[in-house]
Amino acid sequence: MYKYNNFYQKNFIFKIIENDIKSKKYNLIYTRFPPEPNGYLHIGHIKSICLNFSIAKFYNGKFFLRIDDTNPSTENIKYIKSIKKDLRWLGFQWDEEIKYTSNYFNIMYEYAIELIKKNLAYVDELNTDDIRNYRGTLIIPGKNSPYRDRSIKENLNLFEKMRLGKFNEGNFCLRAKIDMRSKIILMRDPVLYRIKYKKHHQTNNKWCIYPTYDFSHCISDAIEGITHSLCTLEFQDNRILYNWILNNINIKNHPQQYEFSKLNIEYGITSKRNINILIKNKIVSGWDDPRLLTISGLRRKGYTASSLKNFCYRIGVTKQNNVIEISSLESCIKLELNKLAPRAMAILRPLKIVIDNLPLGKKIKLLIPNHPNNKNMGYKNIYFTKEIYIDILDFSEVEKKNYKRLILGSKVKLRYSFIIKAKKIIKDINNNIICIHCIYYKNTLGIKIDKKKQEVKGIIHWISFFDAQPAIFYLYNNLFLKKNINKFDNILQFVNKKSLLICHGFIEKNLLKNDKNQYFQFEREGYFYFDKKYSSKNNIIFNRILSLRKNK
Ligand code: ATP
Ligand code: MG
């Protein structure tokens, strides 16, 4: 159970709501999460959901999920499914039925007519380019459209024709009549309705005119009785328009909009548009690629719902734009997995070792704990045999400075097992190592090595032929080479070409027999998660959640 209290009392939105409750402005607090169904949710959305959800729950109010579906050209029902799935997985159950902005299209249409009747909206015939040109810039004031002063009657007539599909897309639109010279560009007669001949996933072909975000958002909030409409900082200017619309139509509620800063994470992107670019360019395999910061990607990589929520509670909510360190996210999952994940041996880059002084077929049974600090997690048997695997990175033919692994002619301890000494390398005609011949020291089981003596270089992990089962390991690194990638336009030029490394190696053969656990710490390698969805019986895939090695 989350302590909404702890998280929430730290941020500025809490103080605003606390005052509203004290002054009896509201008794109950209603919030909403309004995703546009044009992509999968990402970690930035979790921040927004955490905030909205915890506020509503803290005051025993309501939290709605509203699908903000005003643009059928970019939306898809599959995204709605994924949004619902992700919210449920995170454990955020919304109140009442799921809401859709499209539920309110009828009412919105009536409000548009109300604005026309009040001479506060008009049908424009400028095309998109002209609208942009007439709008002006920060320095140049906008110009009135030649169609701005039509009569109310004419506007009503044209708007009706727009609805009936009498015009082509882009030729007509409905605009608010505000001020083309306003300092705030958004207030220079914003578009309220546009024509789109596109079948809508909820309303089918009922409509061919669709309200814009600005027109629909405030009305949806008001209809649902939202008290605090929370959004990200880039909507600061939209607040003025939000209030203008609600002040000029006959609607009961007037929610207040407050803005907070977006979540940005080092080396990662949190924008559906950019994620789409990566998918289209085949840089990633899809929305659930574990290198992405989408909820489905993070889930597949092995992040738990609680670790992601803890992260969002930890970073808090401010108006400051900043970039959060990736290590901060990793430390949240590490904290959980350190306790939860059993330890196991896995060899990612196998190198064969032959123990010369152990007869073929002999198996020395070893009892090892599943977790070194939690005996309650039990023990298991592994076997030391004549042929074992170690990692290629744990062997060197020649002496290297500070190298604490196996070197030709010297000794190393095998984790939970014996000390071995490397005697001879066998190579093929291309000079590739085939295997290393070693001897083992019988009486060295369980002894502590004296690192000062330097006789035994260190401890390495291993797996016996007898215990080994083939597995594929997906090792993920940062997807981008730039820390603050969100500030760049052409993100493709900064893609890290080494963001995915695939290794074919071995795991302990009984690792997955207990179907319940899919998280492991592979000794000295890192935390891994079994990729159930993409694995098959003969193709066992593990995703690396995070590495324990210094050189990844
Ligand atoms: P994107 O750029 O990824 O499309 P968006 O803001 O257009 O983001 P919506 O689906 O419209 O995506 O967002 C739903 C809600 O999530 C909005 O209230 C939005 O402000 C919030 N949100 C989106 N991205 C972030 C983020 N990085 N950090 C915090 N909140 C976010
Ligand atoms: Mg968007």
Image (tube, rainbow, N blue to C red):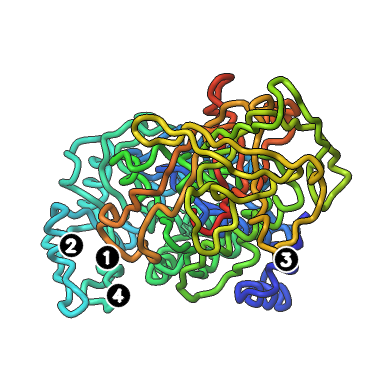
User: Gap between marks 3 and 1, in whole Å?
Assistant: 36 Å
User: Gap between marks 3 and 2, in whole Å?
Assistant: 43 Å
Q: Which residue in the structure is indicated by mark 3?
A: 27
The residue depicted at 64 percent of the width and 31 percent of the height is 356
What kind of element bears circle 2?
loop
Q: Which residue in the structure is indicated by mark 1?
A: 177
What kind of element bears circle 3?
loop
Q: Do we see residue 533 in this rendering?
A: yes
Name the residue nearer the viewer: 391 or 326.
391
Q: Earlier in the sequence, mark 3 or mark 4?
A: 3
**Which residue type does callout 1 highlight?**
Lys
User: Gap between marks 2 and 4, in whole Å?
Assistant: 19 Å
Tag in front: 3 or 2: 3
Q: Earlier in the sequence, mark 2 or mark 4?
A: 2
**Which residue type does callout 3 highlight?**
Asn
Classify mark 4 as within 8 Å of ligand 1 or not, answering yes or no.
no
User: Gap between marks 3 and 4, in whole Å?
Assistant: 34 Å
User: Gap between marks 1 and 4, in whole Å?
Assistant: 14 Å
Q: Earlier in the sequence, mark 3 or mark 1?
A: 3
Judge whether 286 appears above or below 240 on screen.
above
| Residue 184 - label | 4
User: Gap between marks 2 and 1, in whole Å?
Assistant: 8 Å
In the rendered image, the quadrant that contains the N terminus is bottom right
Q: Residues within 10 Å of mark 4 (few under 14, many from 20)?
A: some
Pointers 2 and 1 in contact (C-beta within 8 Å): yes
Q: Earlier in the sequence, mark 3 or mark 2?
A: 3
Pointers 1 and 4 in contact (C-beta within 8 Å): no
| Residue 148 - label | 2
